[in-house]
Amino acid sequence: MHKIKILFFASLRDYVGSKSVEMEIPIGCTIEGLLDLLVTTYPRLEKVRELMMAAVDREYASGSQVIPQGAEIALFPPVSGG
């Protein structure tokens, strides 16, 4: 297990009730695995789980990316434009 920091932006802050949290995750955990853990902890995230975008240490990441120890993860809700 290792510790990471997760930042929540825009409406995700409302779903979680905080702008950031620190969390222990298993070594080798991917972004997809982290999202599974977060939905278990914060069930309101389920409705936007498939639409969230993630960045690891300020670089956009795919769901299969393994999260390194001490990483800072930023999660963004779906964005609409016009």
Image (spheres, grey):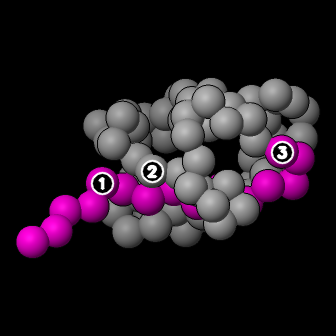
Q: Residues within 10 Å of mark 3 (few under 14, many from 20)?
A: some
* Quarter of image, res 29: top right
**At x 59% / y 48%, what residue is drawn?**
61
Tell me whether circle 1 and circle 2 mark residues in contact (CB < 8 Å).
Answer: yes
Look at the image and tell me in which quarter the N terminus lies: top right
The C terminus lies in quadrant: bottom left
Q: Position of residue 17 (x, y in %)?
A: 48, 60
Q: Residue at horizontal 33%, vertical 42%?
A: 51
Q: Which residue is under mark 2?
A: 53
Label 3 – label 1 distance at C-alpha: 25 Å
Tag 3: amino acid: Pro
Q: In terms of depth relative to the viewer, which is nearer, 63 or 15? A: 63
Residue 37 visible = no
Q: Which residues are magenta?
A: 68-82
The amino acid type of the residue labelled 2 equals: Met
Under tag 2, what secondary structure? strand
Comes first in the chain, label 3 or label 2: 2
Main SS of the magenta part reads: loop
Q: Is residue 48 left or right of residue 74?
A: left
Mark drawn on residue 78: 1
Nearer to me, 62 or 51: 62
What amino acid is labelled 1 in the image? Pro
